[in-house]
Amino acid sequence: MTVDFNEEPHYKFIPSKKATIIKAPFSGGQGKGGVEFGPEQLIKHGLLEEFEELGWKYTIADPLAGTDLIAQKNDPTDVYKNCKRPKMVSECCEKIYHAVSDAHAKKTLPVTIGGDHSIGMSTILAFSNAHPDGGIIWVDAHADINTASTTDSGNLHGCPVAFAMGLDEDNWPPHFAWLKQITKKVKPSQITYIGLRDVDKPEKKILKDLGIKAFSMYHVDKYGIAEVVRQAIEHVADGGKKPIHVSYDVDGIDPMYVVATGTPVRGGLTLREGLFLVEEIVNTGCLAGLDIVEVNPSLASTDTHVMDTVNTGLSIARCALGDTLL
Ligand SMILES: NC(=[NH2+])NCCC[C@H](N)C(=O)O
Ligand SMILES: [Mn+2]
Ligand SMILES: [Mn+2]
């Protein structure tokens, strides 16, 4: 076997290494506090410097500035059937949708920094409207494809994929009218998962019924991460011809490396597997969107654990921006 010395990272769909960093300090998609500090922690510990060092120009968008997130999170009337905080999630996700759509319209790389994963409904929908033939790789311990009817927890961070696909629209909380109006939804064939290991029973049925290709940790163990990523890119991006959005929930990586996250699940990706998959996607030249979500600096008992998690988020960004080990 000959060793493949990679060519310089390149971005076929981003003409001049310009990015838009979209801050999404949002925690309404789940109950725990602290995930709203994700963006400021990542920035405090060097996110912006990474862009500069790796030769990116960037602008920062702050679509939730001026929103009273604390009051909204604590509003006890914001429930609809089993769904928690539908008004807050809907209003914030609409703003994030527009910010990400704007970033795509300007031909920049949208890098959305969460916040909890409910915002994924906005980022993948904005991506697929900007790139109708594009593919989405969702890295996560969870499938986040519960519908408004199947969610057991009522936490909308477990539902963004279902909302972006328009599944079970008839039972959506009425607040999501804006999302209903977006007629081009994400298609099941456009998405694939890597890292799954905690999928709810109704979610398993949805994945099967819709024929969604998903690589669980079982597949990573059996085939190795390199083969899994290859197949994922083959499936969603024709082997590296179409734009790719990566929605990266840091809980896809094992809690050994990522303690400070809201719903950790044992048996996850190693740190290197988690970074390698990003490196490999970048090597196709197709990266055209990125989310880094569920960094919750409040959920670790030591500063070292907080920094492990924050640094994992920073490493994901670094790989996505084209850093190489040599
Ligand atoms: N983005 C996440 N961390 N999602 C966790 C979801 C957990 C569970 N499946 C639920 O629907 O509540
Ligand atoms: Mn998750
Ligand atoms: Mn998730």
Image: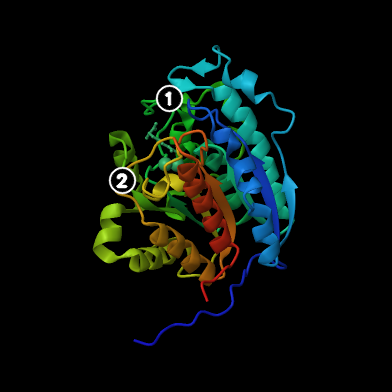
Q: Quadrant of residue 13?
A: bottom right
Q: Residues within 10 Å of mark 1 (few under 14, many from 20)?
A: many
* Residue 77 placement (x, y as % from top left): 55, 12
Using the image as rendered, state which of residue 232 and residue 177 is in the foreground. 232
On residue 154, which mark appears? Answer: 1
Q: Viewed as shown, does residue 202 lie left or right of 120?
A: left
Residue type of the residue flagged with mark 1: Gly
> What element does badge 1 sit on?
loop
Q: Is residue 100 visible?
A: no
Residue shown at the point (46%, 40%) measured from the top left: 260
Disc 2 marks which residue?
197
How does the figure colour the protein chain or chains? rainbow
Measuring from the top left, give residue 127's x and y in whole percent.
59, 51
Q: Position of residue 82 (x, y in %)?
A: 43, 20
Residue 315 visible in the current orientation: yes
Q: What is the distance, in whole Å, between disc 1 and disc 2 at their CAs?
A: 20 Å
Q: Of all residues shown, which one is farthest toward the top?
A: 77
> Which residue lies at the image location 64% right of the left edge and 53% below the top edge?
46
**Is ligand 1 less than 8 Å from the beta carbon at label 1?**
yes
Q: Is residue 182 above or below residue 66?
A: below
Question: What kind of residue is marked 2?
Answer: Arg
Image quarter (top left, top right, bottom left or bottom right) of the N terminus: bottom left
Element under label 2? loop
Earlier-in-chain disc, 1 versus 2: 1
Query: In this rendering, which labeled residue sits more in front, label 1 or label 2?
Result: 2
Q: Which mark is residue 68?
A: none
- Lateral position of residue 317 relative to residue 209, left or right: right
Residue 93's x, y, as percent? Answer: 61, 35
